[in-house]
Image: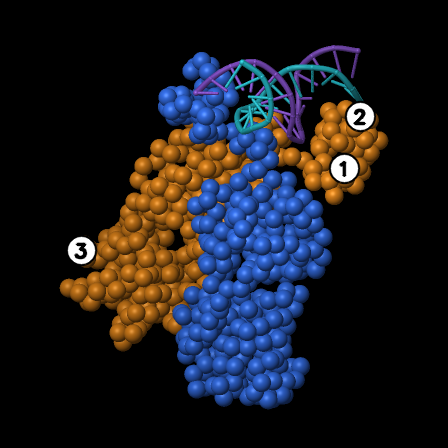
Chain colours: A orange, B blue, C cyan, D purple
DNA sequence: CTGAAAGCGCTTACAG
DNA sequence: CTGAAAGCGCTTACAG
C-alpha cells in the first residue's frame, strides 16, 4: 500500500488538475458528476485520505474542540465528556481532551497546548486552584470561543453552562430542615469555585428562611478529598452542638462520611441525616441509599458541545455572554428519612 | 492584540530571516545566544504562538495520540484515560479521544477521523460489537503504531496491554470454591471480546481443578448491561441446582446482582457468595462489601501512553508484537465470607 | 465545467 | 552563525 496518496497522485492518474480533484473531493457544485465520480472512485481505490494539516493550514480551521477538565476519572466529569463527545462527533468535530489535575499551572500549560493545536473553541471546567484567569486571554484576544461548564467563570463574551447551585443548595438544606434537622453541617468544596460558594449561599438562605441560627462551625470548607475524611469526622465529633444533619457538596464525600459515621456506630438517618450532591451511582448503592441532588452531566455535555458548534457555524441561537442554566432535582432516599 | 503573529512578523521586526527565527524558536544549536534571546523576547512580547498545522505539515508529525474507548463514562475507562493523559502530557503529546459506544460502525468512523487528524499513533480498546478488523489496516498499512489495551486484538506488530484474565478468572473462582461454593454461576460479558472469554476459561479451569462438575446453565453470557438485571435474576431463580456462588465479570453488574438478590431476601454472603471484577469504588461502598479482582487501570493507562511514545521516539524498550501483562490481585471482602 | 497559480506558516538542506 | 529558497498538501479567486 502506498504510504501516502495526495491529490497530485490522483490528478496525475486521471489527467486532471489538482484543483479539480480537490473540488471533486469536497463535492463542489461546479464540477460535473462524471468527473466527481471518477475522482471519488480512484480516491477510494487508492486509499486516499485528506491531509488535515494542509487543509487546516489553508482553511484556518481545524474542526477540533479543546476540552480541559479538572480530572478525567471522576464520574461527573466523564459523564459530561461523554455528552460533549457525542455532540461533537455527530457534527464532525474532534475532541482534544486534557486534565488540569486541579492545578493552575497545568491548566495554563493545557491552555497553551490547546491554543497551539489550533482548536476552534475551548470548553473548560476550572481547576480548584485557579485564581488568575489571564491564560484565557490568549483565546479571547484571538476571538476563539470559550465556554465554561460546571466550574465556571464569568468572563465577557463567554458562555457558561451550569445549574442553579444556590437553589440546589437551598433545596437540599430545606429538605433536611423539613426532616426535623436543627443543627446542620455543610461540608463544602473550595469557595474559589463559585459552584461551591453558591451551594453554601443556598444553605444559608434555607437556614434563614426557617429561622435556624447559623454559627461558623456549621461550615466546613474542604477540598472534598475522601482520603482526608478524618478531619471531617473530627470536626463533627467536636461540634459544640450535636449535629443532626449534613449537607455534603458531593456524593463521593457524602458516602465516605456515612461509612465512617457508621463505623462509629452512628445510625443514619436516625442519628444524623445526610444528603449529597450529583446523583452519582454510588448514592444508590450505599446502605442507606443517599438522598442527593440530580445534576444532569450528560445533558450538560451535549448542550455544551452543541452550543459551541452552533456558535462556530454562525447560527444565531447562542448570544454572546450567554448563560445556560440546567434543571437540578432533589432526590429523596433513605439517608434523610424521618 | 494582533490576531495572528507569524515568524515573518518577527523576522521583519528583527531584520533577520524567517529561517533564523524558526531556528531560534526551536533552540537550534547553530544560532547565537544573542539572536535567540532577541527572538524569544520579541516572540513573547508579541504573543507569538507556533502554527501547528504548518509545522505538522512540514514535519509529517503531529505529537498527537488518538484514543478510542468503548465508553467515556465508565469508571474503568476514565481511569485508564487519566493514566494515558498523564503520560502523554508529560511528554508533550496531545490526546484526541473518541468513544465507539460499543458500535462497530462508530469505531470505524472514529478510526477514519483519527487517521485524518494525523495522529502519530492510535490506542484502542475494542467495542463489544466489533468482529471485523479491517479498519485498522489503514494504520498498519501506513506504519502508524497501533496499541490495544484491555479489550485487545492480536494483530501483527501491535502492542497489547492487558492483565492475565484467565488467571484472574481462575483466582476469583478458586476463592469461591475455597469458601465452600459448590454450584457457581459465571455471569460473563460477550465472548467476542477475549477478556471475557479468558475469564470464563479461568472459571472452568478452577472448576476442573477442584473436580466440580460444569453444566451449561452455569454460564450466562450477557452484555453486562445493568438495566437487564431481570434476565439474570430469572436465570438464577430457574437454575435446576441451587446456586451458592456467583462470579460476575464486572463490579457494576455484580453490585446490581447483590442489590436485586437482597430485595428477594437472599442473604449475601450466607445464601449466595458474590465476587466481581475491576475493583470499582462501588465495590467498597455496597453492603456487604464486594470481593473482587483489582485491575490497575491507571497504571495500564500510564504504561500504554509511555509504551507508544517510547516507540515513536525510537527507543528500544518496545519490540514489535509486544504484549504487556499487568498484575491483577484478588481482593477479599465481605460478600464471599464463609 | 476546468486549469494555472498563489498562498496558508512552517522547516531545513544547501550555500556562504 | 545566518540567508535564500524549496516544499509539505491543500484550497480558491481568477480566468477562460
Q: Residue at x 46, y 74 (%)?
A: B330
Q: Residue at x 62, y 35 (%)?
A: A52
Question: Which residue is at the front of the view, A53 or B26?
Answer: B26
Answer with mark 3 or mark 1, whichever residue precedes in sequence: 1
The percent position of residue A98, horizontal first and vertical second, equals 46, 45
Query: What chain letter is assigned to the residue under label 1?
Result: A
Q: Is residue A136 visible?
A: yes
Give the CA separation, mark 3 to mark 2: 81 Å
Q: Residue at x 30, y 73 (%)?
A: A262
- In what element is the residue under mark 1? helix
Q: Is residue A66 above or below residue B241?
A: above
Q: Is residue A310 above or below residue B14?
A: below
Q: Residues within 10 Å of mark 2 (few under 14, many from 20)?
A: some
Q: What residue is disc 2 on?
A: A16
Answer with mark 1 or mark 2, whichever residue precedes in sequence: 2
On-image quarter of the C terminus of chain B: bottom left
Q: Residue at x 59, y 31 (%)?
A: B57
For residue B227, what is the image quadrant?
bottom right
Q: Residues within 10 Å of mark 3 (few under 14, many from 20)?
A: few
What label does residue A43 carry, if any?
1
Front label number (3 vs 2): 2
- In what element is the residue under mark 3? loop
Q: What residue is disc 3 on?
A: A215
Tally of marks = 3
Front label number (3 vs 1): 1
Q: Is residue A162 visible?
A: no
Amino acid at each position: 500500500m502506498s504510504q501516502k496518496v495526495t491529490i497530485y497522485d490522483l490528478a496525475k492518474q486521471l489527467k486532471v488538475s489538482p484543483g479539480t480533484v480537490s473540488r471533486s473531493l469536497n463535492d463542489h457544485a461546479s464540477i460535473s458528476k462524471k468527473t466527481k465520480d471518477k475522482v471519488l472512485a480512484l480516491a477510494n481505490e487508492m486509499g486516499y485520505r485528506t491531509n488535515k494539516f494542509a487543509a487546516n493550514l489553508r482553511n484556518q480551521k481545524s474542526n477540533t474542540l479543546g476540552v480541559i477538565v479538572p480530572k478525567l476519572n471522576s464520574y461527573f466529569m466523564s459523564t459530561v465528556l461523554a455528552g460533549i463527545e457525542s455532540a461533537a462527533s455527530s457534527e464532525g468535530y474532534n475532541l482534544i481532551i486534557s486534565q488540569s489535575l486541579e492545578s493552575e499551572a497545568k491548566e495554563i500549560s493545557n491552555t497553551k497546548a490547546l491554543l497551539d493545536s489550533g482548536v476552534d473553541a475551548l470548553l473548560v471546567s476550572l481547576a480548584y486552584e485557579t485564581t488568575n484567569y489571564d491564560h484565557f486571554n490568549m483565546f479571547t484576544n484571538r476571538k476563539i470561543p470559550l465556554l465554561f461548564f460546571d466550574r465556571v467563570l464569568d468572563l465577557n463574551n463567554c458562555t457558561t453552562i451550569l445549574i442553579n447551585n444556590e437553589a440546589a443548595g437551598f433545596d437540599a438544606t430545606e429538605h433536611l430542615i423539613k426532616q426535623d434537622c436543627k443543627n446542620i453541617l455543610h461540608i463544602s468544596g473550595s469557595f474559589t469555585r463559585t459552584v461551591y460558594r453558591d451551594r453554601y449561599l443556598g444553605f444559608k438562605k434555607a437556614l434563614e428562611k426557617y429561622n435556624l441560627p447559623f454559627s461558623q462551625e456549621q461550615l466546613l470548607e474542604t477540598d472534598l478529598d475522601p482520603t482526608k475524611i478524618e478531619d471531617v469526622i473530627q470536626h463533627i465529633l467536636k461540634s459544640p452542638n450535636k449535629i443532626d444533619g449534613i449537607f455534603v457538596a458531593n456524593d463521593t464525600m457524602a458516602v465516605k462520611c456515612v461509612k465512617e459515621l457508621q463505623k462509629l456506630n452512628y445510625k443514619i438517618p436516625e442519628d444524623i441525616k445526610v444528603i449529597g450532591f450529583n446523583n452519582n451511582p454510588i448514592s444508590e448503592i450505599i446502605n442507606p441509599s443517599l438522598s442527593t441532588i440530580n445534576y444532569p452531566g450528560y445533558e450538560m455535555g451535549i448542550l455544551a458541545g452543541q452550543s459551541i458548534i452552533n456558535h462556530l457555524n454562525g447560527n444565531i441561537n447562542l448570544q454572546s455572554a450567554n448563560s445556560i442554566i440546567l434543571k437540578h432535582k432533589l432526590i429523596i432516599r433513605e439517608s434523610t428519612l424521618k
